[in-house]
Image (cartoon, rainbow, N blue to C red):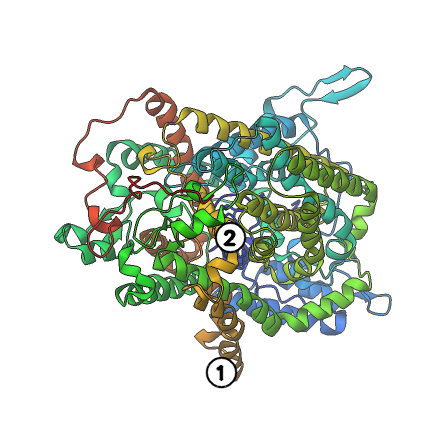
C-alpha cells in the first residue's frame, strides 16, 4: 500500500495472527525511497521500489516468487531461506513450519498445497509464510472506533503534511505513526466504550462491538494513508498563484485535485482480474505491511524490566517534541553547521564545497527534520540500498559536479554550483513572466529578444542522470526479472487463484460498473475543468493523457506486482505535451499530472486491493474507505494550501523563510523548462544541453556489465549493485542539498549497519517504532511552535545561533557574486 502521491519525499507512500520472527522479514526487506514521487521537476520515475503504507519499501529481489506446485516447493523455500540468510538473518520459524506443512500434504494431484492442519495455503512460499490462510467474515470493520480514529487520522495527516510541504525542510508524517498509535488507542477504546446497543431509524449499532481487531486496524491505516502525502495537483495551484499570478478559484482547484486523484481508481478496478486476483501477483511491499500487523496483534512478550513498544514510542516521541524546540526555534544554526566553511568564509571555492547551500562537505545536521526532509527515515532503508545511494550520491555530487563546474562546462562558473533557479546567459535570474503573453503562453519574439534559458551545472547533470536512471529501469527489469515476470504473467492469465482469493468470495465484490462509472465521471469532470477554466489543455489532450496512463497501467502494474519496481510516466508525458503544445507551462504540468499521477494512483489502489485480499477486508468497504479518504485528503490539502498562501508573506521565496516551498520552486522550474521553453529548445540539437539526451542511451546499457559480472562471479558485492537506485539516488537534488544526503547516510549506517548487526534484538523490537516516534514528536512540536509563537510574530531573540548565514558565499558564483534579477533600466519591447 503506497502513500497517495504528491509530496514528498518520501513518505511516501505505506493481520490476524502473529507469525514468529516476521519482524526479521520486515527488517530485512524494507527499503526507503531514494526518489520521492513528488520529485517535482519530473526527471525520474519512482524507480526504486514503491512505498507501502508504513512509508517503507521492499528490496525487489527479496521475493523471488516463482509459481509452482509441490514439485518445486523445496526450491521456493530454499530461495526464501537464502534471501533471509543473505541479509544476515536467521530463517523465520514460520517459514520452517510452512515448509513442513507443504511437504507433508498435497491434494488434487498435487495442484493444491495444504498446511499441517489440512488447510489450503498459497503456492507462493513468501505469501504462505506471512499471510493467514483463515478468515472470520463476521469480524466487524466499519466500527465506531474506526470512524473516530480514521477520520481524525486523515484530517490530521492531510493537514500536517500539507503544512510541512511549504517549509524549507519539508517533512512527511506517514501512516506508520497512525498504525502504531491506533493500536493502543483502539485497545483503550475497547476497554472503556459502552457496549450498549443503540437504535437509529431502524439501524442498530454499538460503539463497542468487542476487542479491537486487525480489520479495524487495517482500515484505519488505509484511510490515514490517503493523507500520508500531498495531492500532486497542489503544486500546480501553488505555481499558478505564486509564480504565474493566476488563480482560478476554489472550485476549479478542488476539481483539479479530485480528478487527478481519482481517475486512476477507475483504471485499477478494471485491472483487478489481472493484477490482484491471481496468486502470482504478490505485491511484495504488502508482505511487510502484513508482517507488522501480525506483530502488533500478537501479545507482546517482554522480559522483566523491558519496555513495551508503546512505552518506548511515548518516551521517544516526548523527547523528540522537546528537543525540536532547539533547532526549530532556539538554536536553528545546528540544522546545518558548516564546520569547514568557518575556517575561511570569504573563500569562494571553500564556501561552494563546504557550505550548506553548496556541496555540503563536512556539514553537520543535528535536526531529525532536516535529515529526513527529502529522503524519509534512514532507520527504514536497509544498508544494501544505502550503499547504492551513497555510491550514486558521491559520484554525482562530489565527483561529477565539481569536475564539470570548475572546468566551466556550459559556462558553469557564471552561476552558483547548486540551485534550481533559472538564469539568463548574462547571469541574472530568468524573468519568466516577461516572456509570456497575458494568457501565460510563450511570446516567441520576446523570448528571442530576451535570450535562452540557463540552469546550474548540478541541475543539468541531475537531469542527465535521471534520464539514465529511467532507461536503466527498463534494462535492469529485463535482465533480472524477465523470466519471473513472464512465468507469473502466464500463471495470471490462467486465472490461478489461491486460498486468499477464495476466502474473499464470502464478501460481495465491487461491481465493475462502479469503477467504470467513477472513471467516466472523473474523466468528464477533468475535461470540464480544463475547458471551463483556461488550463490551456484542450479536451483531446486530457483524453490523450488519460489514454497514456491507461495504456501503460497493465504492463507497469505487472512489473510492480512482481518486482516492486514502478517505472514512471513523468518524462514521457512531459516530452509528449512539450512537443504537442510548446510554450504552455500550465498545460504541460496539467497534462503530466493526468498522465502520470493517474497511473501512479492506479498502482497504489491496486496495491491496497491486494492488501485487502491478504487481510480479508470486504471489497466494498475497502472501496468506500479509499474513496472517502482520498476526497477528504484532497479537500484538506487545498484548504491548508489556500490558508498558507493567503496568510504567509513572501511565501515560496527566500524572504519568506522558513516558508520557501523548495518542492514548488523546483516544480516551477520544471514547468518553465518543459512547458515554456519546451524540450525542442531546451534539449534539441541546437541547445548546449543536447548532450544530456545521450544519458538515455548510457542508462540503457549500464546494467549489462554489472549483470554479467555478477553472474560470472556470484556471491560478491556486485550482487548488491542496483543500477536504477544508484543512478536515481540523487533525484531529489535539488531541492534537497548534499549535506542532507551525507547526514542521512551517516544515521543510516549507525542504525541499519551497526545497530542491526550488533544489537539485532533491539533493532527488531524498536527500530521502526523509534522512526515513527521521532517523526511524530517533531510534527507536534513544529505545530505547537508555529501556532503559539511564530504565527503571532514572536521570534527567539537574535544571537549567533539564530543567524543562518555563516557561510554567505555558498550561494555565490565562482566570482563571489550573489546573482540578482536583471536590471529593468531597458525594458524588453514586444515586437509589433
Quarter where residue 648 is shown: top left
Quarter where residue 205 is shown: top right
Residue shown at the point (36%, 33%) measured from the top left:
321
> Residue 12 at x, y = what percent?
52, 46
Mark 2 or mark 1, earlier in chain: 2
How far is disc 2 from disc 1 in space, using C-alphas?
A: 43 Å
> Residue 672 at x, y = what percent?
47, 48
SS at circle 2: helix
Q: In this view, does 239 lie above or below 551?
A: above
Quarter where residue 536 is shown: top right
Say which of 131 and 680 sits in front.
Answer: 680
- Farthest residue to the right: give it: 108
Q: Name the residue under label 1.
A: 713
Observer able to see residue 150: no
SS at circle 1: loop
Q: Mark 2, mark 1: which one is toward the viewer?
A: 2
Q: Mark 2 points at which residue?
A: 674
Mark 2, other Cα within 10 Å: few <14 / some 14–19 / many ≥20: many
Amino acid at each position: 500500500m503506497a502513500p497517495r502521491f504528491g509530496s514528498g519525499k518520501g513518505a511516501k507512500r505505506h493481520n490476524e495472527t502473529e507469525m514468529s520472527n516476521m519482524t526479521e522479514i520486515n527488517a530485512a526487506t524494507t527499503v526507503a525511497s531514494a526518489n520521492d514521487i513528488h520529485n517535482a521537476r519530473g526527471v525520474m520515475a519512482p524507480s526504486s521500489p514503491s512505498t507501502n503504507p508504513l512509508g517503507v519499501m521492499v528490496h525487489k529481489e527479496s521475493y523471488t516468487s516463482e509459481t509452482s506446485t509441490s514439485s518445486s516447493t523445496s526450491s521456493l523455500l530454499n530461495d526464501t531461506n537464502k534471501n533471509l540468510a543473505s541479509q544476515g538473518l536467521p530463517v523465520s520459524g514460520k517459514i520452517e513450519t510452512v515448509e513442513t506443512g507443504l511437504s507433508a500434504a498435497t491434494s488434487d494431484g498435487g495442484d493444491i498445497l495444504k498446511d499441517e492442519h489440512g488447510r489450503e495455503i498459497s503456492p507462493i512460499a513468501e505469501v504462505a509464510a506471512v499471510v493467514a490462510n483463515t478468515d472470520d467474515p463476521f469480524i466487524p470493520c466499519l466500527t465506531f472506533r474506526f470512524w473516530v480514529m480514521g477520520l481524525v487520522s486523515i484530517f490530521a495527516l492531510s493537514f500536517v503534511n500539507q503544512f510541512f510541504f511549504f517549509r524549507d525542510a519539508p517533512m512527511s508524517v506517514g501512516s506508520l505513526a497512525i498504525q502504531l498509535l491506533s493500536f493502543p488507542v483502539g485497545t483503550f477504546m475497547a476497554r472503556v466504550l459502552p457496549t450498549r446497543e443503540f437504535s437509529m431509524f431502524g439501524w442498530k449499532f454499538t460503539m463497542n462491538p468487542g476487542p479491537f481487531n486487525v480489520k479495524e486496524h487495517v482500515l484505519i491505516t488505509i484511510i490515514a494513508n490517503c493523507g500520508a502525502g500531498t495531492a500532486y495537483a497542489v503544486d500546480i495551484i501553488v505555481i499558478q498563484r505564486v509564480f504565474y499570478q493566476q488563480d482560478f478559484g476554489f472550485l476549479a482547484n478542488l476539481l483539479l485535485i479530485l480528478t487527478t486523484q481519482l481517475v486512476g481508481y477507475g483504471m485499477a478496478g478494471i485491472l483487478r482480474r489481472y493484477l490482484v486476483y491471481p496468486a502470482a501477483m504478490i505485491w511484495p511491499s504488502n508482505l511487510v505491511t502484513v508482517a507488522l500487523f501480525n506483530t502488533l496483534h500478537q501479545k507482546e512478550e517482554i522480559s522483566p524490566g523491558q519496555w513495551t513498544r508503546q512505552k518506548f514510542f511515548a518516551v521517544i516521541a516526548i523527547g523528540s517534541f522537546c528537543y525540536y524546540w532547539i533547532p526549530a526555534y532556539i538554536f536553528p544554526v545546528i540544522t546545518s553547521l558548516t564546520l569547514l566553511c568557518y575556517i575561511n568564509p570569504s573563500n569562494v571555492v571553500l564556501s561552494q564545497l563546504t557550505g550548506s547551500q553548496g556541496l555540503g562537505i563536512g556539514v553537520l545536521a543535528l535536526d531529525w527534520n532536516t535529515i529526513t526532509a527529502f529522503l524519509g527515515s534512514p532507520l527504514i532503508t536497509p544498508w544494501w540500498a544505502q550503499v547504492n545511494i551513497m555510491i550514486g550520491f558521491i559520484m554525482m555530487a562530489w565527483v561529477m559536479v565539481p569536475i564539470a563546474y570548475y572546468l566551466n562546462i556550459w559556462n558553469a562558473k557564471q552561476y552558483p554550483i547548486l540551485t534550481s533557479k533559472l538564469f539568463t546567459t548574462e547571469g541574472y535570474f530568468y524573468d519568466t513572466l516577461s516572456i509570456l503573453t497575458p494568457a501565460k503562453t510563450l511570446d516567441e519574439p520576446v523570448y528571442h529578444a530576451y535570450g535562452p534559458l540557463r540552469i546550474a551545472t548540478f541541475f543539468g547533470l541531475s537531469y542527465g542522470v535521471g534520464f539514465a536512471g529511467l532507461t536503466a529501469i527498463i534494462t535492469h527489469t529485463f535482465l533480472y526479472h524477465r523470466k519471473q515476470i513472464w512465468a507469473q504473467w502466464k500463471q495470471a492469465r490462467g486465472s490461478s487463484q489461491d486460498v486468499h482469493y477464495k476466502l474473499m468470495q464470502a464478501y460481495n465484490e465491487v461491481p465493475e460498473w462502479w469503477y467504470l462509472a467513477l472513471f467516466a465521471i472523473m474523466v468528464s469532470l477533468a475535461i470540464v475543468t480544463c475547458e471551463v477554466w483556461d488550463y490551456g489543455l484542450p479536451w483531446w489532450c486530457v483524453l490523450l493523457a488519460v489514454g497514456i496512463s491507461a495504456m501503460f497501467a497493465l504492463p507497469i502494474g505487472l512489473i510492480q506486482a512482481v518486482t516492486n519496481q514502478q517505472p514512471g510516466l513523468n518524462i514521457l508525458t512531459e516530452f509528449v505535451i512539450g512537443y504537442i503544445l510548446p510554450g504552455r507551462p500550465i498545460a504541460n504540468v496539467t497534462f503530466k499530472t493526468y498522465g502520470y499521477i493517474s497511473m501512479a494512483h492506479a498502482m497504489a489502489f491496486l496495491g491496497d486491493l491486494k492488501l485487502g485480499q491478504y487481510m480479508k477486508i470486504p471489497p466494498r468497504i475497502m472501496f468506500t474507505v479509499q474513496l472517502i479518504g482520498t476526497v477528504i485528503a484532497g479537500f484538506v490539502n487545498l484548504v491548508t494550501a489556500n490558508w498558507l498562501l493567503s496568510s504567509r508573506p513572501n511565501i515560496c521565496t527566500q524572504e519568506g523563510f522558513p516558508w520557501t516551498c523548495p518542492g514548488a520552486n523546483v516544480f516551477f522550474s520544471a514547468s518553465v523548462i518543459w512547458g515554456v521553453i519546451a524540450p525542442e529548445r531546451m534539449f534539441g540539437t541546437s541547445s548546449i544541453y543536447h548532450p544530456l539526451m545521450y544519458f538515455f542511451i548510457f542508462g540503457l546499457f549500464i546494467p549489462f556489465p554489472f549483470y554479467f559480472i555478477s553472474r560470472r562471479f556470484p556471491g560478491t558485492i556486485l550482487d548488491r549493485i542496483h543500477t536504477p537506485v544508484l543512478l536515481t539516488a540523487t533525484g531529489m537534488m535539488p531541492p534537497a542539498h548534499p549535506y542532507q544526503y551525507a547526514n542521512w547516510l551517516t544515521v543510516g549506517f549507525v542504525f541499519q549497519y551497526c545497530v542491526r548487526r550488533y544489537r539485532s534484538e533491539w533493532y527488531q523490537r524498536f527500530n521502526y517504532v523509534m522512526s515513527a516516534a521521532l517523526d511524530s514528536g517533531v510534527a507536534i512540536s513544529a505545530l505547537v511552535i508555529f501556532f503559539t509563537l511564530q504565527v503571532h510574530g514572536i521570534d527567539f531573540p537574535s544571537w549567533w545561533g539564530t543567524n543562518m548565514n555563516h557561510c554567505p558565499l555558498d550561494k555565490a558564483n565562482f566570482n563571489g557574486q550573489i546573482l540578482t534579477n536583471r536590471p529593468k533600466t531597458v525594458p524588453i519591447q514586444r515586437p509589433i
